[in-house]
């Protein structure tokens, strides 16, 4: 049972001491008949909002509709997830034109989910006994998204883990991207230090409950550059085995962060919530 002690946020109604924002969720991948009830329960139980990331243009359009239905609670991000085949040049141009239209109309959004195909690449290389994987089209597409994020001054949400994170950092620096969010990040101590020094944000999933690698990341990363997420509907193991991923589970990640940072839960939750509001411009 969660501690329901209330804390007053400046300019906000009272929220529970463990209030959170799920900083990365694929809302459009939940069934339509499931989505409304799930969000209403989450908001009633202390979730202050969610960041709905997209897979491609159709996904982006679906998340725009959801965000319009839950204005101020669902913050959309538009992009192309890298763990899938690169679309045609015409499809890419259509996506970028659509994003630019959203910007011209003054709508709130981020760029994402974008990045590099670590899992697709490594699986292909293993299946082909080390045969080369053509990563160049993905690097070029990420460069284009980074240039767009810099031009529009929008946050960018990144899928870039392990050695791919260094490539992503090079691209971010090349285009002068100021606001970068590496979701569910895993990587070396050196790249973690580089990301922290650059002011990039990292979000942590509920797997911090049972993954030592993620626990070590939390211990090393500055808490003012951390957020929490679920990456729902992705399922988790450990204490969450067999459970449907819900936005409220981001609050569990916040509690684990509090323990690792040796902070009261309410203090850690307040910091993580403020971090996410500040980064995404959510009120």
Image (spheres, rainbow, N blue to C red):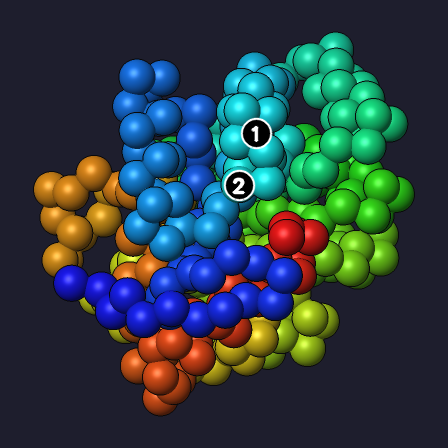
Residue 77 place in picture, x, y as percent: 61, 36
Instruction: Depth check: give the residue in front, 171 or 219.
Output: 219
Image quarter for residue 120?
Answer: top left
Give the residue at x 71% y 71%: 198
Q: Is residue 222 visible?
A: yes
- Looking at this view, name the residue that lies furthest to the bottom: 262
Image quarter for residue 64?
Answer: top right
Give the residue at x 61% y 47%: 157
Classify residue 111 as left or right of residue 149: left
Give the residue at x 47% y 51%: 48
Instruction: Depth check: give the residue in front, 83 or 107.
Output: 107
Q: Is residue 213 visible?
A: no
- In the image, residue 6 above or below residue 261: above
Q: Give the quadrant of the N terminus.
A: bottom left
Residue 281 place in picture, x, y as percent: 69, 53
Image quarter for residue 147?
Answer: top right
Mark drawn on residue 102: none
Residue 282 place in picture, x, y as percent: 63, 51
Mark drawn on residue 67: 1
Callout 1: SS: helix
Find disc 2 in the rendering and name its residue: 73
Callout 2: SS: loop
């Amino acid at each position: 049972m969660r501690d329901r002690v209330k804390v007053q946020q400046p300019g906000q109604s009272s929220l529970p001491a463990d209030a959170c924002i799920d900083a990365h969720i694929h809302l459009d991948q939940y069934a339509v008949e499931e989505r409304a009830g799930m969000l209403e329960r989450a908001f009633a139980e202390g979730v202050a909002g969610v960041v709905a990331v997209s897979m491609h243009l159709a996904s982006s359009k679906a998340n725009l509709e959801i965000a319009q239905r839950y204005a101020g609670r669902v913050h959309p991000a538009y992009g192309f997830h890298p763990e899938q085949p690169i679309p045609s040049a015409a499809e890419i141009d259509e996506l970028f034109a659509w994003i630019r239209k959203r910007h011209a109309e003054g709508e709130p959004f981020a760029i994402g989910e974008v990045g590099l195909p670590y899992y697709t690449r490594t699986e292909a290389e293993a299946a082909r006994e080390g045969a080369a994987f053509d990563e160049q089209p993905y690097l070029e597409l990420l460069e284009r998204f980074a240039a767009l994020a810099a031009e529009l001054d929008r946050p960018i949400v990144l899928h870039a883990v392990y050695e791919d994170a260094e490539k992503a950092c090079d691209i971010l620096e090349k285009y002068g991207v100021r606001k970068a969010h590496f979701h569910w990040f895993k990587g070396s101590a050196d790249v973690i230090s580089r990301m922290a020094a650059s002011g990039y944000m990292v979000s942590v999933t509920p797997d911090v409950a049972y993954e030592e690698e993620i626990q070590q990341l939390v211990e090393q990363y500055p808490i003012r550059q951390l957020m929490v997420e679920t990456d729902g509907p992705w399922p988790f193991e450990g204490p969450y085995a067999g459970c449907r991923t819900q936005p409220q589970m981001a609050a569990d990640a916040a509690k684990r962060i509090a323990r690792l940072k040796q902070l009261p839960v309410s203090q850690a939750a307040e910091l993580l919530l403020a971090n996410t509001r500040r980064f995404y411009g959510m009120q």
